[in-house]
Amino acid sequence: MTSKDQIIEVLRQVMDPEIPGLSIVDLGMVGDVSVEGDTVHIDLIPTFLGCPALDFIGRNVEKAMAGRPVAIRWVHDQPWSSSMISARGRQALSEWGIAPPSEQSEVTCPFCGSHHTSHTSPFGPALCRAVYYCHDCAQPFEKIKTV
Ligand SMILES: [Zn+2]
């Protein structure tokens, strides 16, 4: 594990703690990666302020590196934006029943694809998600807020 690409491949195994199948790479959290001597330097871009999982993610990154010295730097001067979620990441969100962020005001139901949805609560179980309701399949669902 010496090249940047190899390290990114390892980081693909580190999942968002709340959404199985969504890796931190696809979430757009991984910034610069470099290797100096034995130490892997990884810049991580925190997602929404208030998402309480950052320490947990940091520990999982260390675990994924399997004992290799890791220096994690949380980058705060490069704000994370929901547009940094990859196509694969958006797919993982939909499969988990969460609408990915979008620029459109229309919100698509992740279960049936209907646009006949309405906003029910600005705060979901996590601050970064909002709760919607689909009038066609009568399912509540969450959407990642667009930031
Ligand atoms: Zn629906």
Image (tube, rainbow, N blue to C red):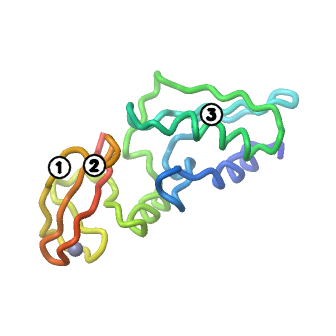
Of the two numbered discs 1 and 3 in the rendering, the one whose residue sits closer to the viewer: 1
Gap in Å between the C-alphas at discs 3 and 2?
Answer: 31 Å
Q: Which residue is mark 2?
A: 124
On screen, 109 above or below 62?
below
Q: Amino acid at mark 1?
A: Ser
Q: Is residue 98 left or right of residue 131?
A: right
Q: Which residue is mark 3?
A: 32
> For disc 2, does the CB lie below 8 Å from ligand 1?
no
Which SS class for mark 1?
strand
Gap in Å between the C-alphas at discs 1 and 2?
Answer: 7 Å
Q: Residue 70, image x and y in percent?
A: 75, 32
Which SS class for mark 2?
loop
Q: Are marks 1 and 2 in contact (CB under 8 Å)?
A: yes
At x 81%, y 45%, the residue is 66
Disc ID at residue 121: 1
Residue 137 or residue 70, whichever sits in front? 137
Q: Amino acid at mark 3?
A: Asp
On screen, 6 above or below 53?
below
> Which quarter of the picture shows residue 65?
top right
